[in-house]
Amino acid sequence: MTFTPMPYRLAPEIVAKRQQKREAKLHQSFDETVKEVRRERQSLKKVRRNELSSKSVSGRFTSR
């Protein structure tokens, strides 16, 4: 089985870019920043959930 990098994994450059954007928005209200961080965490959770479900689905079809 060959390893293929999955496109939904975030590259370190993207994470760093987001971190820089977040720091640049320090003039924003605190609440908005908190909401943004929560949104990013939720999207990461969704990615992990999709990763798990896609693995189980692909496993199901290969076993047939």
Image (cartoon, rainbow, N blue to C red):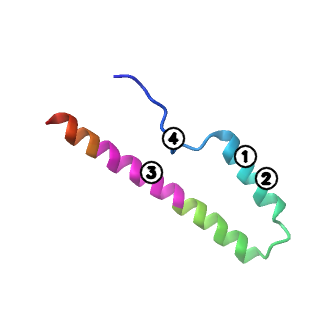
Residues under labels 4 and 1: Cα distance?
17 Å
**Label number found at residue 16:** 1
- Residue 51 within the segment the image draws in magenta: yes
Left or right of 35, for residue 2 = left
- Residue 8 within the segment the image draws in magenta: no
**Label number found at residue 20:** 2
Q: Earlier in the sequence, mark 3 or mark 1?
A: 1
**Residue density around tag 4, few if under 14, some if 14–19, many if 20 or more, within 10 Å:** few
Q: Earlier in the sequence, mark 4 or mark 1?
A: 4
Q: Which residue is mark 4?
A: 7
Tags 2 and 4 touching, CB below 8 Å: no
Amino acid type, callout 2: Gln
User: What SS does tag 3 mark?
Assistant: helix
Q: Residue at x 71, y 74 (%)?
A: 32
Q: Residue at x 66, y 40 (%)?
A: 12
Q: Which residues are magenta?
A: 43-56
Q: Residue at x 13, y 36 (%)?
A: 64
Residues under labels 2 and 3: Cα distance?
24 Å
Residues under labels 3 and 4: Cα distance?
13 Å
Amino acid type, callout 3: Arg
Amino acid type, callout 4: Pro
Left or right of 52, for residue 5 = right
Tags 1 and 2 touching, CB below 8 Å: yes
Point out the frontmost of discs 2 and 4: 4
